[in-house]
Amino acid sequence: MCGIVAAASQNNVINILADGLKHLEYRGYDSAGIAVIENKKIHSYKREGHVSELTNILDKKLTSNIGIAHTRWATHGKPSEINAHPHVSDNNIAIVHNGIIENYIEIRDKFFKETKLESDTDSEVLAHLINSYSKENDILDAVYLALKEVKGSYAIAVLDKNNADEIIVARHGSPLLIGVGENVNYIASDAHALIMHTNKFIYLEDGDTASISSKEIKIYDTNKKPVQREIKKSNLSLDSNTKNGYEHFMLKEIFEQPEAVKATIQDRIINNTVPKEILGPNVDKYLSNFNLVQIIACGTSYHAALLAKHWLEKLAGIPCQAEIASEFRYRKHAVQKGTLAVCISQSGETADTLSALRQIKQEDNYVGTVAICNVPESSIARECDSTLITHAGPEIGVASTKAFTTQLVALMLLIIVLGKRFDVTDELEKSLCEQLKTLPTKIKSTLDLDNEIAELSKIFSNKEHALFLGRGSHFPIAREGALKLKEISYIHAEAYAAGELKHGPLAIVDENMPVVAVAPNNVVLEKLKSNLEEVKARGGKLYIFADIKAGFKSDEISQVFEIDAPMNPVAPILFTIPLQLLAYHCAIIKGTNVDMPRNLAKSVTVE
Ligand code: M6R
């Protein structure tokens, strides 16, 4: 949520800020702004809309050695130029902020009752607060004093007109890193914004504050004690920031899935076994004493959790609960002794999941925490006992695709390791490993459905609503298909367990309601077929994604798309692919912004 980029250099930083914002745009894109110090004055430029709206108005002659910039996803105050960051106080202090200041009304009433605020944001009060403390303190102290008043989450970067060489930054609950350069240092919400300039990063920890100039980086902990943080080398490639010839990041990422899955299993399956060492040095803390699993996640990652629950219970006989993090964190739990917590998150920064994890760590009955995560340096990855990184590579499209399929692959590896003390025999382990190894090739063949699905989308994209049906371990896949469709094409879609149709949703089925069915050749196939007959009998049009052996034929009411997905536990992963393509092609026909759908952002670092 919101992207921050900033730089202090011996040279002009304008292009660094503008390019950085473009690479962070996936985090929020309803307005953008930049503030620099030039001739001892703060100059600020803001625009509603995408980053290009801002860069179009930037004076080509503008130069400065220091500046902060922001791309916004609105929380307090609608998307508008006034509410865009930076917020400038008294022409003295400019700040950019990611996160939510929960007590901003209290702060406003306590300190600024007489001040006319310009914006409706929570962030503007923080700019005024820092400014008022800066009258009698140096800027670092002013930031410390202001943040003492704040409840909520933040990553901030602050410019002070009277201190034109340094930027003060602080983080609590929202990610922020420092990029280390030669005669230049950078700040950003994530490494994508800076990888073209440096691969050396310092990941700030919660409670850290830092002062950054072109020559120096000084980091302090919550008590203002200087601290050292390790400089890490990133292996992000410049390539991951480009579409590589594809029209959209989403399409590129869908087609990257064979490679992403291959990378996720690589070196983790050895002679058809999965060693416990894939979970790192802390695995023994929980491996021999856990007896049930609690999974926590949001959105697409939650759909991965739902499928993992099926797998854990069916394949390993391990009891499992899966819950949406935003619900989990606000209810009382009856936690059983010996619970292992698993957090699934592409970004590793999702506020609800992170906060649920932190609650779990306070509770004695949990014996360990495992992260399934795509970003090794993220908070969730760092704060769990074990982390199984999904090697999907950076996912830029807001709609999660390759992150989802690689999460499923990583979860299957985890289940194999956890299940050895339960029902996963050597024989089952071997068979699951073999299935995982065939996945990249099978995904490649499933991607061949692309043209057929593009054709289908010509009809589908005219619809206003759609129903997605699945049963058992394929119900989470139907849910994911519905989420993908609504997220990027804005067609309202709902998923139901097919057996639930007759308990209500069948009432909305008629010739205008397309019904998408996920039809593997498994034990509930005949039951699913009966459910689909109920749809046909009501005139509903069916689009069936079926295994080649499931015995479906197209007719005037149903159109069948065949997938070679043998009846085995990893089949649901293959059924995901055509549903991603369906959402993509519908969005293209509807002309929506595929990579940056309205109202959303990639990394949800606010509640
Ligand atoms: O980074 P996370 O996996 O924690 O993100 C969770 C959700 O915000 C995310 O999966 C979201 O639902 C996707 N944009 C859906 O495509």
Image (cartoon, rainbow, N blue to C red):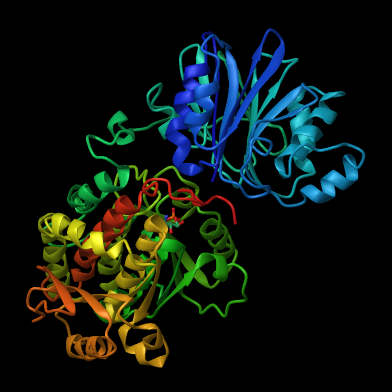
Closer-to-camera residue (245/433) = 245
Rendered residue at 30%/78% (across/down): 469
Quadrant location, the C terminus: bottom right
**In this rendering, is residue 455 above or below 305?**
above
Describe residue 196's horizontal placement relative to residue 523 as left or right: right
Describe residue 190's horizontal placement relative to residue 512 as left or right: right
Describe residue 160's horizontal placement relative to residue 534 as left or right: right
User: What is the count of numbered marks?
Assistant: 0
Rendered residue at 24%/59% (across/down): 458
The quadrant of the picture showing ligand 1 is: bottom left
Find residue 124 and report its image quarter.
top right
Rendered residue at 53%/32% (across/down): 229
Q: Do we see residue 165 in this rendering?
A: no
Closer-to-camera residue (103/245) = 245
Describe residue 531's horizontal placement relative to residue 355 as left or right: left
**In this rendering, is residue 247 above or below 546?**
above
Closer-to-camera residue (379/44) = 44
Q: Position of residue 377 (x, y in %)?
A: 43, 42
Q: Position of residue 162 (x, y in %)?
A: 75, 15
Q: Position of residue 25 (x, y in %)?
A: 46, 38
**In this rendering, is residue 270 above or below 190?**
below
Find residue 175 and report its image quarter.
top right
Q: Do we see residue 82 in this rendering?
A: yes
> Seen from this angle, which residue lies furthest right?
114
**In this rendering, is residue 414 above or below 208?**
below
